[in-house]
Image: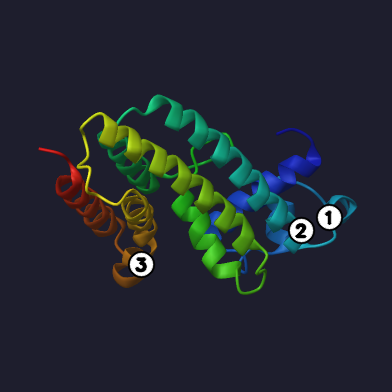
Amino acid sequence: MSGTRETIIETAFLLFLKRGYKAVTLSDLERAVGMTKGTFYYHFTNKEEVLKEGISEYYRLLNRKRTEEFEQIHSLREFIDVTIRHLLEIDNYSAKSFDSDIPEILCLSLLVEVISIYPEFREVVLNTKVSWLSKLEQLILQAKRKGEVRDDVDTSILAKNLLNIGVGVINYLIMHQDISYALSAVRSQYEQLYSLVKAG
């Protein structure tokens, strides 16, 4: 991204992820970007517009990265290993730009905060989930053809379970406020599910 407008979107989005949408004020954005209130209003009408553009840009980049990643994954085991690695990166999250690997779970946490205010984000999340499920189902079918996954496993249900385990990190964090516990619990769920569905 380049230019003042893009810098505002990127900086604001990263602040929203870190501190929450409601907690970030226009003054916070002005300081973070090094701009005046007039500069902000030259590019945007309000904070909501910046949030919407940030989420749209994030999901555009995430879907591109996912597509590239899936082209490199050739087994369900690889998928689980990559997914766990991404979850572990939450603990060391220090994104400075959209080009950084921003864990999706952080964006989902932000969406949980704002979805009641901006219900149109449901469609963004739904479209992403449908795309992700489709990729997972294709990977599972490929794993079945290669003999990695049992033939009697329901492809659609397995894909949904794999997707929901990752999202479960939010629940663990809310309940326990301990990221290491949350990641350990989620890793155990992935490993247990894989052991149940693998062939042989």
Q: Which mark is residue 44?
A: 1
Residue drawn at x 61%, y 45% as measured from the top left: 58
Question: Could you tell me residue 142's position as x and y percent?
Answer: 33, 33
The answer for how far apart the CA atoms under marks 2 and 1 are is 7 Å
- Work out which quarter of the rendered image holds the N terminus and state it: top right
Question: Could you tell me residue 67's position as x and y percent?
Answer: 51, 33
Query: In this rendering, is residue 55 above or below 1?
Result: below
Q: Specify few, some or many for label 2: CA neighbours under 10 Å numbering under 14, 14-19, or 20 or more.
A: few
Question: Could you tell me residue 17's position as x and y percent?
Answer: 54, 55
User: Which residue is label 2 attached to?
Assistant: 49
- What is the quadrant of residue 176 in the picture? bottom left
Q: Is residue 50 left or right of residue 191?
A: right
- What is the quadrant of residue 179 in the picture? bottom left
Kindly identify the amino acid type of the residue bearing the numbered disc 2.
Answer: Glu
Q: Earlier in the sequence, mark 1 or mark 3?
A: 1
Q: Specify few, some or many for label 1: CA neighbours under 10 Å numbering under 14, 14-19, or 20 or more.
A: some
The answer to whether the residues at label 2 and label 1 have Cβ atoms under 8 Å apart is: yes
Q: Is residue 4 left or right of residue 121?
A: right
Q: Secondary structure at mark 1?
A: loop
